[in-house]
Image: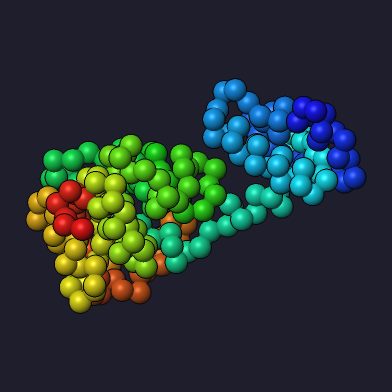
């Protein structure tokens, strides 16, 4: 018995999905695709999950403007994670380094420093989600990672053996600080402290709580410079 025939026989429960992505609709309704291996693999996983539970599903299109409930999470913003370095200051500093990034690895549609960016959560403009899960060798990257994932990100750079621009605080007492210094291609460049060094998109008058003391270091890092 073929997969399609078998699935149609499992009609104890029928689920009608409303999706605003036409590619996703085609993959689900046709039980796969020959155009994209990742889409085919994901479609197969979804169908196998349904088969085990005797579920038959179909998908129909809903315009994105009407897909309010499903898009709610991706449209939320968290101001504590949206701080960005003043673009003029950042790009002037990067111009002094012999490296030209083409993507921002920790950004959103509100604070991306380069047209292509990777978001930490679903974002309609992102080229990918969660930089920590990607193969970084495909990127010439710039990164201003959340302070809580700096150690993890430095380890990721080492594991992938890649080179890029990374901005992190000048906090010598942190456990990750010696590793960052070891990975330097050139001496880091300092930014701040400054009242307007960090900006919050959409709230231009709000000042960063660490503005009086925070010094950022712009590193040109290489994973091959560090001994695991």
Q: Residue at x 76, y 47 (%)?
A: 52
Q: Quadrant of the C terminus?
A: bottom left
Q: Residue at x 42, y 50 (%)?
A: 133
Residue 21 placement (x, y as % from top left)? 65, 35
Determine which quarter of the picture holds residue 196.
Answer: bottom left
Q: Quadrant of the N terminus?
A: top right
| Residue at the extreme left of the image, as rendered | 187
Query: In the picture provided, is 75 more to the left or to the right than 27?
Result: left
| Residue at the extreme right of the image, as rendered | 12
Query: Between residues 22 and 203, which one lies in front from this camera angle?
Result: 22
Task: Tell me, yes or no, if residue 13 can be seen here.
Answer: yes
Query: Between residues 158 and 138, which one lies in front from this camera angle?
Result: 158
Residue 46 higher or lower than 27, as above or below: below
| Residue at the extreme top of the image, as rendered | 34
Determine which quarter of the picture holds residue 37.
Answer: top right
Query: In the picture provided, is 17 more to the left or to the right than 117?
Result: right
Q: Residue at x 85, y 33 (%)?
A: 8
């Amino acid at each position: 018995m073929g997969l399609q025939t078998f699935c149609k026989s499992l009609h104890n429960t029928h689920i009608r999905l409303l999706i605003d992505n036409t590619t996703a609709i085609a993959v689900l309704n046709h039980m796969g695709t020959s155009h994209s291996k990742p889409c085919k693999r994901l479609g197969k996983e979804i169908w196998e999950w349904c088969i085990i539970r005797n579920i038959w599903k179909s998908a129909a299109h809903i315009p994105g403007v009407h897909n309010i409930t499903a898009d709610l999470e991706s449209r939320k913003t968290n101001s504590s994670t949206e701080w960005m370095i003043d673009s003029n200051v950042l790009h002037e500093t990067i111009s002094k380094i012999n490296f030209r990034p083409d993507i921002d690895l920790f950004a959103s549609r509100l604070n991306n420093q380069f047209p292509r960016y990777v978001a930490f959560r679903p974002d309609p403009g992102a080229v990918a989600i969660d930089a920590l899960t990607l193969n970084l060798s495909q990127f010439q990257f710039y990164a201003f990672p959340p302070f809580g994932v700096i150690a993890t990100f430095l380890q990721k750079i080492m594991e992938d053996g890649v080179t890029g621009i990374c901005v992190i605080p000048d906090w010598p007492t942190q456990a990750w600080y010696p590793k960052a210094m070891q990975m330097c291609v050139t001496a880091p460049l300092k930014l701040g402290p400054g009242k307007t060094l960090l900006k919050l998109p959409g709230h231009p008058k709000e000042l960063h709580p660490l503005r009086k003391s925070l010094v950022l270091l712009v590193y040109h890092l290489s994973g091959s410079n560090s001994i695991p």
